Image: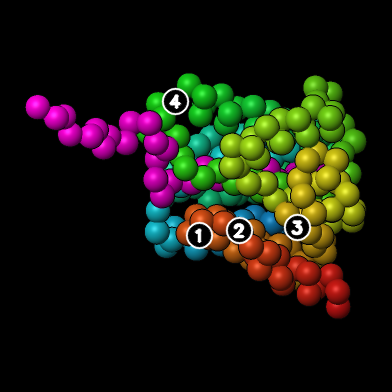
């Protein structure tokens, strides 16, 4: 008697599920745009709730140290950011924030059942200045981490103000087409989060990311 093929999905990842990790600069220089950042982020996530598919959301604020606001919370249960969550102060320990977040999510995926691992993972990194305060990670260590995860299909985008975003992203292994500058103004912050929303939607709904998510920011930078 011939046995039927086993079509179980036990060895596949969770389909139509996305791991979203937001790493947001909360150093002192962000204080003038505190309300705009909170509002932009909340609006962006609110629109994502209408997108088909599931998502886990992690939100990390970084200054001298990192603060985890959401740790893999289901999108439909994520609470809006408040001024208590986002209180800019201190310096810019970017490498520590990224290194810790990548390692944390990587370990969760490593020890989870295959069928519980989201089939897509997107990291969104935003900063309005250069790294200047990390103690545990340097660019080389973060680059090694990111490149190893990119080989597994993870996506990373880097959005920076007052710096050369492409150069800063390249230092940690993120390609130029995934890095873009934004203007640290009220209008620029609104465009930042519209671009982030476009990237998130594209990552969740399409098989591959194209460059259209950044079009508004590129136009703004060239104006």
- Asked whether 189 falls inside the magenta stretch, the response is no
The label number, if any, that marks residue 209 in the structure image: 2
Q: Point out the frontmost of discs 3 and 4.
A: 3
Disc 2 to disc 4, C-alpha distance: 26 Å
Instruction: Count residues near mark 1 (Cα–Cα under 10 Å), then give few for <14, some for 14-19, many for 20+.
Output: few
* Secondary structure beneath label 4: loop
Is residue 154 shown left or right of residue 55? right
Mark 1 touches mark 3? (CB < 8 Å): no
The label number, if any, that marks residue 177 in the structure image: 3
Disc 1 to disc 2, C-alpha distance: 7 Å
N-terminal of the two: label 4 or label 1?
4
In the picture, the quarter occupied by the N terminus is top left
| Residue found at the very far front of the displayed protein | 1
- Estimate the x, y position of residue 142 in percent, counting from the top left: 77, 31
In the picture, the quarter occupied by the C terminus is bottom right
Instruction: Count residues near mark 2 (Cα–Cα under 10 Å), then give few for <14, some for 14-19, many for 20+.
Output: some
Identify the residue shown where x is 55% and y is 60%: 202
The label number, if any, that marks residue 73 in the structure image: none
Which residues lie in the magenta part?
A: 1-28
Mark 2 touches mark 4? (CB < 8 Å): no
N-terminal of the two: label 3 or label 4?
4
Is residue 12 shown left or right of residue 7? right
Mark 1 touches mark 2? (CB < 8 Å): yes
The label number, if any, that marks residue 206 in the structure image: 1
Residue 100 quadrant: top right
- Estimate the x, y position of residue 138 in percent, counting from the top left: 84, 28
> Which residue is tagged 4?
112
N-terminal of the two: label 2 or label 4?
4
* Secondary structure beneath label 3: helix
- Estimate the x, y position of residue 126 in percent, counting from the top left: 74, 50
| Residue found at the very far left of the displayed protein | 1
């Amino acid at each position: 008697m011939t046995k039927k093929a086993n079509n179980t999905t036990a060895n596949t990842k969770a389909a139509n599920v996305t791991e979203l990790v937001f790493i947001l600069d909360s150093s002192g220089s962000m204080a003038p745009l505190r309300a705009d950042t909170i509002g932009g982020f909340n609006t962006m996530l609110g629109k994502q709730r209408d997108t088909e598919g599931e998502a886990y959301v992690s939100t990390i604020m970084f200054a001298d140290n990192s603060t985890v606001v959401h740790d893999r919370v289901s999108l439909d249960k994520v609470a809006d950011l408040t001024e208590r969550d986002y209180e800019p102060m201190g310096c810019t320990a970017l490498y520590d924030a990224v290194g810790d977040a990548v390692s944390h999510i990587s370990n969760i995926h490593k020890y989870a059942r295959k069928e519980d691992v989201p089939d897509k993972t997107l990291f969104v990194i935003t900063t309005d200045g250069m790294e200047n305060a990390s103690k545990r990670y340097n660019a080389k260590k973060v680059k090694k981490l990111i490149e190893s995860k990119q080989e597994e299909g993870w996506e990373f985008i880097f959005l920076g103000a007052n710096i050369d975003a492409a150069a800063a992203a390249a230092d940690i292994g993120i390609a130029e087409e995934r890095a873009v500058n934004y203007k640290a103004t009220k209008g620029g912050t609104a465009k930042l989060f519209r671009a982030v929303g476009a990237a998130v939607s594209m990552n969740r709904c399409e098989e591959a990311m194209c460059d259209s998510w950044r079009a508004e920011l590129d136009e703004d930078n060239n104006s």
